[in-house]
Image (tube, rainbow, N blue to C red):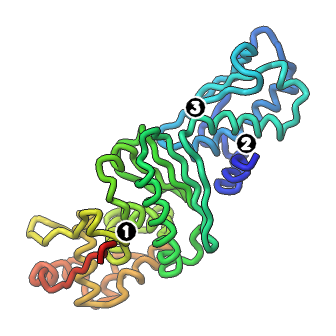
Amino acid sequence: MKKFLIIALLLGPLSVIAQERGYRLTISDENNVVDAKTKVKLDTAFNQVYPKFAMADGYRTKRKAELTFANSETPTIKAKAGEIKVNSDWVKNKSQKKIEKELFTALSKNWVSYSQEKHKGYTLTFISKDPNLDPAVRKNLISTYFEIYPTLVKTFNEKSTHDVLFVVDTAYKAVAEASGNRILFSAGYMKAHPTDIDVVTHETMHIVQGYGYSAGPVWLTEGIADYVRYKYGVDNVGSKWSLPAYNEKQNYTNSYRITARFFAWLEQNVKPGLIATLDQQLRAHQYTDQSWTALTGKTLDQLWADYGKEPQKVTLTYSSKKS
């Protein structure tokens, strides 16, 4: 029951919006082995539990599932993404809560590991779908969260959630991504880059940003996240991560590290605290192209031109666990 309650609290009630988001359950019962009332309970349990499982589960988890009755395969419920099997004898006369609990227990068995840690008011739930995840990598991802995330919340957005979910997924092929309070990590990337722990800094900043839709350009959002990684990262040296030198082919719209270096230059040469102010405007949906002129007296293009004239006029210092 503990696992189910944790995910329920972490992700909130989803039954109301389950169908709106495309979650569908098909119950196959040609022989009518259960009555209509039981089928309603099963459908309700699916809408309560499966969306939470899918959101926590990771990348491309199936939204539609088929439920069949297979008494020879399970004494209660057996489930995975897209497929649920129920013992018809067991489910008869079971309470709604009992069915939901058993369904989540069955679904969570698809995860290799599941844990939750709390520290000074912050919670991290960690799910791994990778049986080969290095325990040291797992430990470092968790410790980086507790080291950096509270700092980012206090510095940029105290209204940010204190409950975050990490999922390491073997099906996800990029690096990492944040959505809501969940961060999805590529198992393949973490295996190839086990020291890149400050991917946590970048992605948790996305949670802190919480801009919503149409707040501003993507390059600005990603540039801020990488600037924050540069400034607040716990071990960029160990991660073998740095900001690239300027060249004339670059543009501030390139995002990520290129934009982040420009922001470091702006902070040191134009206006300290500029990036934090832009972050606040984006969150409040008050950012416009005119924000740059209002804050610095120059347009964004003029600032980039100034940067191109003296790109070396910036001191870059990188964090290191060994220092």
Residue 318 higher or lower than 189, as above or below? below
The x, y position of residue 210, in whole percent, is 51, 66
Evaluate if marks 1 and 2 touch, with contact meaning CB atoms under 8 Å apart. no
Of labels 1 and 2, earlier in sequence is 2
Q: Is residue 227 left or right of residue 312?
A: right
Mark 1, other Cα within 10 Å: few <14 / some 14–19 / many ≥20: many
> Which quarter of the rendered picture does the N terminus lie within?
top right
Give the amino acid at mark 1: Ala
Give the amino acid at mark 2: Gln
Mark 2, other Cα within 10 Å: few <14 / some 14–19 / many ≥20: many
Give the amino acid at mark 3: Ala
Q: Which residue is mark 3?
A: 81
Assign a secondary structure to mark 2. helix
Does residue 284 show up?
no
Numbered label attached to residue 48: 2
Residue at the image position 29 percent from the left and 63 percent from the top: 239
Of labels 3 and 2, earlier in sequence is 2
Q: CA distance from mark 3 to mark 1?
A: 33 Å
The label nearer to you, 3 versus 2, is 3
